[in-house]
Image: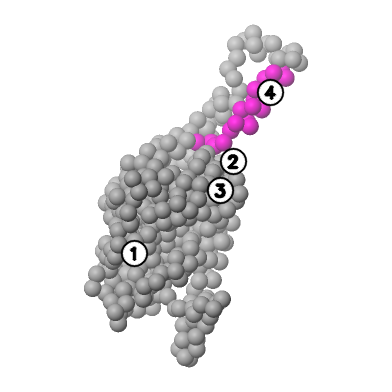
Amino acid sequence: MEHQAKKNLYLVKGHTLEGKVIKIILVLSGGGAKGAFQVGVWQALREYGILTKYGIIHIEIPHVIFGISAGALNGAMIAQGKEQELAAMWKKIAGHPEEVYTSDFFEFEGQKIKIKGKGIMNHFIPEMTFLEKAGLIFKGRRKKLYKQIEAKLRAFKAISDNTPLANKVKKHVLLEDFKCEAYHPGFVSIRDGAYYNSPHTDYLEDSELQKAILASATIPVAWKPVDQVTSKRFTVNSLVDGALRNVTPLGDAVKYIQNDTENCEYHFVVVSCHTGKTELMKKEPNVLDIALRSTYDIAMNEVLQNDINTFTRINDLVRQANEKGVDLFHKGRKLKEYGITIIKPSRELGETYDFTRDTIHDSINHGYKVTKEELSKPNSA
C-alpha cells in the first residue's frame, strides 16, 4: 500500500513570524559507533530547546531530517518520535557489539577489539586431515588448494555480518510511524559511485525504507553492501554508507528548502560526530583500523569541515550583504540567510567500530554536555 504523506504537520506550534512558519532542519552526520553522541545531543535539545534568533524553540520532532550513516538510523528514530527507544537501543548496544554485528575475524577482549587469527585461517583455508596435509607435497594438490583459497577471496565481501543491526531497523522503522514532513537517508552505489537520497514518502514499502537506512549505515569492508533499494525516484544496487560522498548532507538540506513553496523561516541544527580535527592514533593499527582510519577519520573529517565551513561562509556573506541593504543571487535565485546551530564533540570520541560499554556511554553523556553548553552561549543562534 502506498504511504500517504501527512500534510501540514508543523510541530513547532505557536512559533510564527509575520505569518511565517519557523521550520527546524536537523542534519545528522555519519560516524559509526560515534553516533551515540547524537543521542545525548537530542536529549539535551528536547530538554532545553533550540536557541534561534526568534528565541528558544521547543520541538518534539524536527520538520525535516537528513541523516547519513549512524545519523540515518538516529534520524529515523527521531522522525518517528521514538527517542526513548533510540536511547534504549544504544544503551543495549553498549558493551554488546553482537547487537550490531557478528564476525569470525574479530573478538572483544575487555574494552579492545582483537583479530582472531584462527578465525581468518578457518575461513580461507579448508580443514584438512593429516593425509591431506601430507599430500600438499604434490604440486597438483597445492594448485587445487590455491584455487579454493582464491575462490573464497573473490567471494569475500565483508569482515563481519550486520544482520543484528538489520533486525533492529526492521523492528523500529515503520512508514506509518513517521511524523516529520520529510526524512532523507543518504547512501552511495558502489556500481556507479553516485550518492542517492529520497524522502521517506517516496518509499512505497517499509522494507525499502529499511534497506535504505541500512545501506546508509553500511560501513564498506566491515559489512557487505545492500543489494538493492527502490523508491519512486530510482532503483539502485550495491549500496553502502552515504558518508563516503556526503558525510554531512548540508547541501541536500539547502536544496530541499529552496524547493519549498511555503513562506517559511528556517533554522538548521547540524550535529557532527567529529571534532573537525584528525587526532593522533595511539595504537598500532590492524587491517580494520587502517580501512576505517583512512576513510572515516581522515578523508571524511576533511569533507565534513569543508561542508560546514562553506555553508557558514556563504551564510555570513549573505548576512553582511543584507545588513547593507544588498541582495546576493546564485543562478538567478536570491540567497537567504539561515539560522544555524552546529554541535560537535569538544574532544575525540571512540573509534568508528568501538561499541564497548564505556565508549558508548561516554559519547552519549558528552553529547548531552556539549549541547547544554552550546545552548548557553549568547551567540549560538
Q: Which residues are magenta?
A: 142-160
Query: Around disc 2, counting alpha carbons within 10 Å, would you say few (fewer than 14), some (14 to 19), or many (20 or more)?
Result: few
Residue 352 visible at all = no
The image quadrant where one finds the C terminus is bottom left
Residue 338: give x, y in percent of width and height: 42, 75
Q: Which sits in the foreground, 325 or 114? A: 325
Q: Is residue 303 above or below residue 326?
A: above
Cα distance between the residues tagged 3 and 4: 30 Å
Q: Taking 337 as reference, is 302 left or right?
A: right
Secondary structure found at label 1:
loop
3 vs 4, front mark: 3
Residue 8 visible at all = yes
Secondary structure found at label 4:
helix
Q: Is residue 67 above or below residue 372?
A: above
Residue beneath the point at 47% across and 41% down = 112
Secondary structure found at label 2:
helix
Q: Which residue is mark 3?
A: 189
Cα distance between the residues tagged 4 and 1: 55 Å
Q: Amino acid at mark 1?
A: His
